[in-house]
């Protein structure tokens, strides 16, 4: 492996390398905005078309697990931001521990999501697996839960990649590979993790909150 | 390793701590308000609070508030193209006759038939 305290050959300085890494990650995240944005657009179109059906379907999601999972992801983002800050202040051991903690919170999120999926399986809410929804909102509920599974599974895949990246960066950080002038992939990994959190913030409002006030 | 000669400060920077508390507060607020019957305002509040939470994450956790303007431009580019996609799509869906399609109406009773089984 290259010495992280020296810039790669195509960069004049470590500061330039760090700036390019940050901008490159933002270019990637912009494509991710459009990737999830297409799904958000389809949600907006069909919720606008079937507002009562989406409200009725959303009431069948588990708001307790949804809220706890949101708090878990927000906390994990806080730990990642704090951990990246520690690594950049030459406290790699502590920063690595914080990033590892965030990765554990990510695993906890996935575990709770699995509990939620198993509930939905028992309640016949998985499209294609004997989907059942009583009342006149069957078709809209089918659309809602199709969106729900596509988007939460895509989010879970992103989160899994993020957990793997965090574990690698945390281990290297704890060994003192990175420092204030050479944070290496810490910046990009943190940006990616925060973005996955950001997507979930909107998913929470789309999936769990509609229809809670009754009608 | 130069750690032993440095003063190691193991408390989170105040801006990160503040953002975390703010995010959890907003989460509690948005869940509470979702149970208050406000009609269309429920949706506006849910996505308004989501936008505030997203801004906190982007500005403080993703450091857009403190880094070079170029990073903010790169971040805004994604939202700009997203806005174009929503604008063009709703030019279509908001003005299209026959969307959403009307539910199937029974020839005998004249009322929409609930579809309770798989089509």
Image (cartoon, coloured by chain):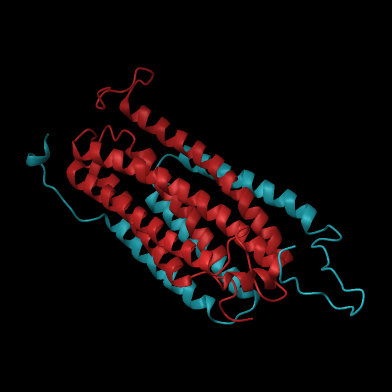
Count the numbered circles shown: 0
In the picture as drawn, the residue positioned furthest to the left comes out as B5
In the picture as drawn, the residue positioned furthest to the top comes out as A9
Residue B118 is situated, as x and y percent measured from the top left of the image, at 71, 64
Residue at x-position 70% and y-position 58% = A45
Nearer the observer, A142 or A85: A142
Quadrant (top left, top right, bottom left, bottom right) of the N terminus of chain A: top left
Query: Does residue B48 show up?
Result: no
Quadrant (top left, top right, bottom left, bottom right) of the C terminus of chain A: bottom right
Q: Quadrant of residue A214?
A: bottom right
Q: Colour of chain B?
A: cyan
Residue A36 is situated, as x and y percent measured from the top left of the image, at 57, 49
Residue at x-position 27% and y-position 48% = A100
Q: Quadrant of residue B45?
A: bottom right
Nearer the observer, A157 or B78: A157
Residue at x-position 63% and y-position 57% = A128
Q: Is residue A164 above or below residue B34?
A: above
Note the chain letter of the red one. A
Left or right: A159, with B106 as reference point: left
Residue B97 is situated, as x and y percent measured from the top left of the image, at 86, 60
């Amino acid at each position: 492996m290259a010495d992280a305290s020296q810039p790669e050959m195509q960069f004049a300085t470590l500061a330039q390398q760090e700036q390019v890494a940050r901008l490159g990650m933002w270019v990637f995240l912009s494509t991710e905005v459009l990737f999830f944005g297409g799904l958000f657009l389809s949600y907006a179109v069909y919720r606008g078309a079937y507002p009562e059906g989406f409200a009725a379907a959303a009431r069948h999601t588990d708001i307790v697990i949804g809220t706890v999972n949101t708090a878990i992801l927000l906390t994990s983002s806080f730990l990642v931001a704090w951990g990246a800050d520690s690594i950049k202040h030459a406290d790699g051991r502590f920063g690595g521990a914080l990033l590892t903690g965030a990765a554990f919170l990510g695993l906890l999120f996935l575990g709770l999501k699995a509990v939620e999926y198993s509930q939905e399986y028992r309640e016949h809410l998985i499209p294609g697996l004997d989907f059942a929804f009583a009342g006149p909102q069957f078709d809209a509920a089918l659309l809602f839960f199709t969106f729900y599974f596509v988007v939460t599974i895509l989010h879970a895949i992103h989160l899994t990649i993020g957990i793997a990246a965090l574990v690698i960066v945390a281990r290297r950080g704890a060994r003192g590979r990175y420092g204030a002038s050479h944070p290496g992939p810490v910046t990009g990994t943190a940006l990616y993790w925060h973005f996955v959190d950001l997507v979930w913030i909107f998913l929470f409002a789309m999936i769990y909150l509609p229809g809670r006030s009754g009608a | 390793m130069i750690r032993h000669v440095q003063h190691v400060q193991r408390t989170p920077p105040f801006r990160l701590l503040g953002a975390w508390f703010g995010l959890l507060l907003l989460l509690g607020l948005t869940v509470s308000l979702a149970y208050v019957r406000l009609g269309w305002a429920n949706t506006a509040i849910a996505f308004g609070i989501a936008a505030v939470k997203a801004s906190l994450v982007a500005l403080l956790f993703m450091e857009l508030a403190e880094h070079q303007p170029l990073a903010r431009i790169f971040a805004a580019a994604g939202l700009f193209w997203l806005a174009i996609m929503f604008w063009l799509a709703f030019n279509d869906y908001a003005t299209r006759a026959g969307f959403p399609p009307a539910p199937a109406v029974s020839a005998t009773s004249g009322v929409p038939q609930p579809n309770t089984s798989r089509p």
